[in-house]
Amino acid sequence: MASPAPREGEGESCGKEEWLIYAFVARGIAVLAEYTEFTGNFPALAAQCLQRLPAGSSNPGGATSRLSYACDRHTFNFLIDRGYGYCVVAKESVPKNVSVAFLERLKDDFMKRYRGGKADTALAKSLNKEYGPVIKQHMQYVLDHSDEIEKTSKVQAQVSEVKNIMLNNIEKDSKR
């Protein structure tokens, strides 16, 4: 995979600006809206990954599923929910919780705007003009708040661990 390069006329940037490279929202395998500031073959690779998701992962009534694929120092992260797929291509070094937070944010906003509306019948790429800039805004928000996202994720993991310990202790006590 070609490494992402800034589009012509853009200066080289480094750091978090290059964490999230490309993102899209799809219904089934039809990409409805996408956004990137970089050139490269990641849109084609992400579309191939979308087509190869395990059967049942895009079930319109099924549970939410998360999948991730690695390729050439990048991760292709997917969140599938109610027949819609949300994808972000990120550098391999990006903390997983940052990618997950972006996908959750994108899903929540997209569903709030389009649930039961034109997304259900939209043609491929037909929401690019109106939703592409929104994808960009969500990318920027997550990049700007990545430190808080990481801290929150760590606290949630600790709370979950304590909860599991407490449940195990209650279970042990009830067997006595």
Image (cartoon, grey):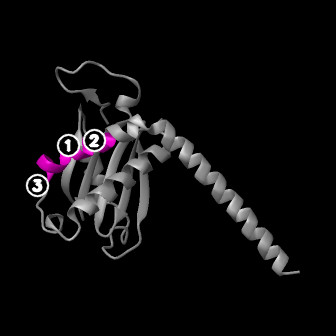
Does label 2 or label 3 sit earlier along the sequence? 3
Q: Is residue 157 above or below residue 139?
A: below
Which residue, given by chain and number where applicable, does mark 3 sit on?
126
Identity of the residue drawn at 19% across and 51% down: 33
| The quadrant where residue 92 appears | top left
Q: Is residue 110 left or right of residue 172?
A: left
Q: What distance separates the C-alpha of mark 2 from that of mark 1?
A: 6 Å
The residue mark sitting in front, 2 or 3, is: 2
Residue position marked by numbered label 2 in the rendering: 137
In which quadrant of the rendered image does the N terminus lie?
A: top left
Q: Amino acid at mark 1?
A: Pro
Looking at the image, residue 67 sits to the left or right of residue 86; the answer is right
Amino acid type shown at disc 2 = Gln
Proximity of marks 2 and 1: CB atoms separated by less than 8 Å: yes
From the top left corner, tell me how far across and down residue 18 is, in percent.
Answer: 35, 31
Segment tinted magenta in the rendering: 127-139
Q: Which mark is residue 84?
A: none
Look at the picture and state if 83 lies above or below 78: below
Three-letter code for the amino acid on which mark 3 is drawn? Ser
41 in magenta: no
**In the rendered view, does 176 fall on the left or right side of 83?**
right
Does the CB distance between marks 2 and 3 fall below 8 Å? no
Real-space Cα separation, disc 2 to disc 3, in angstroms = 19 Å
Query: Disc 1 marks which residue?
Result: 133
Q: For the residue labelled by badge 3, is the local secondary structure a helix, a strand or a loop?
A: loop
Residue 133 is one of the magenta-drawn residues? yes
